[in-house]
Image (spheres, rainbow, N blue to C red):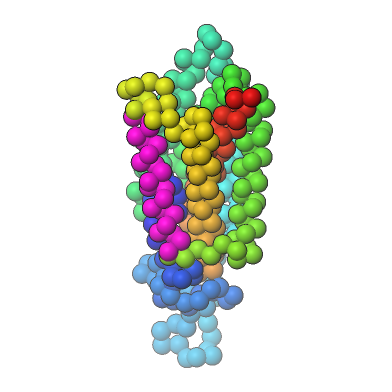
Amino acid sequence: MRSSNPVFSRRGFSRDNGRAGFTAAPQAGGPAVGTNPYATNPYATNPYAPQQGAQVGGPQAPPRADVMTIDDVVTRTAMTLGTVVLTAVLAWVLLPVDEANLGKSYGIAIGAALVAFVLAMVQSFKRTPVPAVILAYAAFEGVFLGVISNAVSTYIAPGVVIQAVLGTMAVFAGVLIAYRARWIRVTRRFYGFVMAAAMGFLILMAANALFSLFGGGDGLGFRSGGLGILFGVIGIILGACFLALDFKQVEDGVAYGAPREESWLAAFGLTVTLVWIYTEMLRILSILQGND
């Protein structure tokens, strides 16, 4: 499956009717069998699948030690998010947004955002995750978020950053609870709908940015006022849907013995999705408080 991420594609796990499909048998306690994307590489050997030529009930190969676990995903995600937070704090402190330095700080922030996007695209076209690229993406993304958050907090809505962080955490917790309770079922139809909606959303936002660049102001008005709030809410809903897709990817990888390195891709996707939700949350709250 292609990426569950709103910005770029990455390798994932095929799904059918809400379950991942793999040719090899899943690990004990895993979901149903279907098409395993790891079945064609040397790391795909499932320790629970009968070996060719082995007798049923005979000795089985010992479990591999290089498979992805939830702990791996949590650790890598903590590293990438920690990098985002650390560089954001440093940018907040070292890149002031007062009148004398605002232009310079904004320039650095936009440059960091472009570098982060390039690094994300580089990783998306890599066949295997590159931790250095992923962490560098997180670092540059943090610089961008630190300057933008500082500017919004200083000139538009003091205290909005903490609210946006809490809102992002609430969305994450809510989607995780809903996913674990199976209130959200990730099916092929769900995936197609979310990706189509995200594509339309990104096209509209790109058009708005283009009109803003040449016409000034907010372009088509999609990112300010009432329309800005509406599209911000749509963006958060899309981010929540991408979180569900990310959770499904992690669940499939753990259940079917994905290589441990795949935990970096899972962390990468979760980080991008959470950054997406945070920026949309920050925009909505700044519009609402700026209108007070």
Quadrant occupied by the N terminus: bottom left
| Chief secondary structure of the magenta portion | helix
Quadrant occupied by the C terminus: top right
Picture residue at 65% right of the left edge, 58% below the top = 177
Instruction: Give above or below for 285 relative to 276.
Output: above
**Residue 8 at what x, y percent from top left?**
39, 47
Whether 200 is among the magenta residues is: yes
Q: Is residue 226 left or right of residue 71?
A: left
Picture residue at 42% right of the left edge, 26% below the top = 218
Considering depth in this image, is 203 or 112 the residue closer to the camera?
A: 203
**Residue 219 at what x, y percent from top left?**
38, 27
Q: Is residue 8 left or right of residue 156?
A: left
Whether 2 is among the magenta residues is: no
Q: Is residue 71 visible?
A: no
Q: Magenta stretch?
A: 189-210
Quadrant hosting residue 191: bottom left
**Residue 19 at what x, y percent from top left?**
49, 70
**Residue 255 at what x, y percent from top left?**
54, 68
Residue furthest out toward the top: 100
Total marks in image: 0
Instruction: Give above or below for 233 relative to 48.
Output: above
Picture residue at 63% right of the left edge, 37% below the top = 165
Instruction: Give above or below for 178 relative to 267.
Output: below
Instruction: Give above or below for 182 relative to 238.
Output: below
Quadrant hosting residue 222: top left
Q: Is residue 70 visible?
A: yes
Picture residue at 61% right of the left edge, 19% below the top = 154
